[in-house]
Image: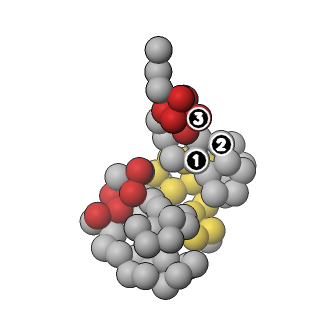
Amino acid sequence: MPDSTESSRSPLKRAPCPNCGEPWLRPTQLPGRLRCVNCLTRFELVSQCPNCGEHQTILRMSNTEDMQCQSCGASMLRAT
């Protein structure tokens, strides 16, 4: 039986869209850019947290699980 924390996250193991909350973010042809297939919103992965201003390296955030700020937990994705 799967752990309850795993099942509450995303059954598809993908990062949720900051706009609609669905797990349909897909990378585009440009590095650091993503698009939600559900709501069609485009996002850019930024190196400075929009919430607290903490700087992080993009290389460290290349994994979808690292798209949250290490300091405050806010999303590092900015709608474009």
Report whether residue 40 is seen.
yes
Residue 78 x/y as whole percent? 58, 70
Give above or below for 80 relative to 63: below
Mark 1 vs 3: CB contact within 8 A: no
Q: How far apart are the two marked residues, 3 and 2, measured between alpha carbons?
A: 12 Å
Task: Name the residue that disc number 2 marks.
Answer: 22
Residue 28 x/y as whole percent? 47, 54
Marks 3, 2: nearer the viewer: 3
Task: Name the residue that disc number 1 marks.
Answer: 16
Residue 62 x/y as whole percent? 33, 58
Quadrant of the image containing the C terminus: bottom right
Give above or below for 30 relative to 46: above
- Which residue lies most toward the bottom here? 53
Q: Is residue 24 left or right of residue 64?
A: right
- Mark 2 secondary-structure assignment: loop
Q: Which residue shows up at 35% across the image and 75% down it?
A: 56
Mark 2 vs 1: CB contact within 8 A: yes
Report whether residue 45 is seen.
no
Give the numbered dot on residue 8.
3
Nearer to us in this view, 37 or 75: 75
Q: How far apart are the two marked residues, 2 and 1, measured between alpha carbons?
A: 5 Å
- Mark 1 secondary-structure assignment: loop
Q: How far apart are the two marked residues, 1 and 3, measured between alpha carbons?
A: 12 Å
Marks 1, 3: nearer the viewer: 3
Callout 1, which amino acid? Pro
Callout 3, which amino acid? Ser
Give above or below for 8 relative to 37: above
Q: Which residue shows up at 62% across the image and 68% down it?
A: 79
